[in-house]
Image: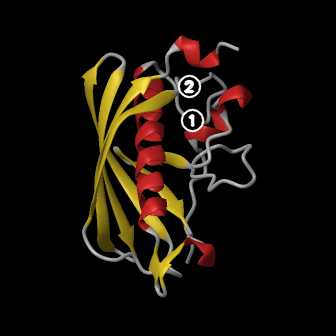
Amino acid sequence: MSQKIEYAIQDRYPEDFSWCYGCGRLNKDGHQFRTGWDGDQTATYYQPESAHTAIPGFVYGGIIASLIDCHGTGSASLALHRKNGFEPEDTELPPRFVTASLAVKYVKPTPEQKQLKAVGTIEEIHPKKFKVIVEVFAEGELCATGEVVAVVMPASFGAK
């Protein structure tokens, strides 16, 4: 059974900042990762496609890194949005984060044809900086872990 996120933080990002190849809802060629709350942790579900093959039967590691990266920044956005008194289903625009650092550890090969679940545990380390520990599972089996340090997107990113 395929699971999905009902209220994703990415659904609330402003259009100008919804083009990320990993999580941008407006990027029809991208992965469109969707991150939401799962209790006190965050979750993203993703079904890799056959084109995401590393070797037959296994998912390319870059897809896993991208999932961890976008899940981390989405989780940070969720955390600060909640701290500010809002949830993803609210109409208030959430803060947008960018990656300051990304570390990925591949625990075991990630099988193709299986829905992936990224789970995030969030730690605030500064009012505008969060660390998110991410675990990626395929059918309950831990395949990869990661650490994302995410910072509130600088205002200069929106300057044209």
Image position of 152 with respect to 12: above or below: above
**Labelled pair 2, 1 in contact (Cβ < 8 Å):** yes
- Tell me the residue that label 1 is attached to: 88
Q: Residue at x 46, y 30 (%)?
A: 98
Coordinates of residue 57 in the picture (x, y in percent)? 47, 86
Q: Residue furthest bottom?
A: 56
Name the mark nearer the viewer: 2 or 1.
Answer: 2
| Residue type indicated by callout 1 | Pro
Residue 94 is marked as 2
138 relative to 145 in the view: left or right: right
Q: Is residue 106 above or below residue 129?
A: below
Is residue 68 in view from this perspective? yes
Q: Residue 61's x, y, as percent?
A: 41, 65
Secondary structure of the residue carrying tag 1 is loop
The one nearer the camera, 2 or 66, is 66
Q: Mark 2: which secondary structure? A: loop
- Specify whether residue 14 is in view: no
Q: How far across and how far down the image is residue 48, in percent?
A: 56, 70
Q: Which mark is residue 44?
A: none
Q: Is residue 11 left or right of residue 98?
A: right
Which residue: 34% across, 74% down? 140
Residue drawn at (72%, 46%) of the image: 27
Relative to 38, residue 82 above or below: above
Indicate the amino acid at tag 2.
Pro
The crowding category of the residue bearing disc 1, from other C-alpha atoms within 10 Å (few below 14, some 14 to 19, many at least 20), is: many
Gap between marks 2 and 1 measured at Cα: 8 Å
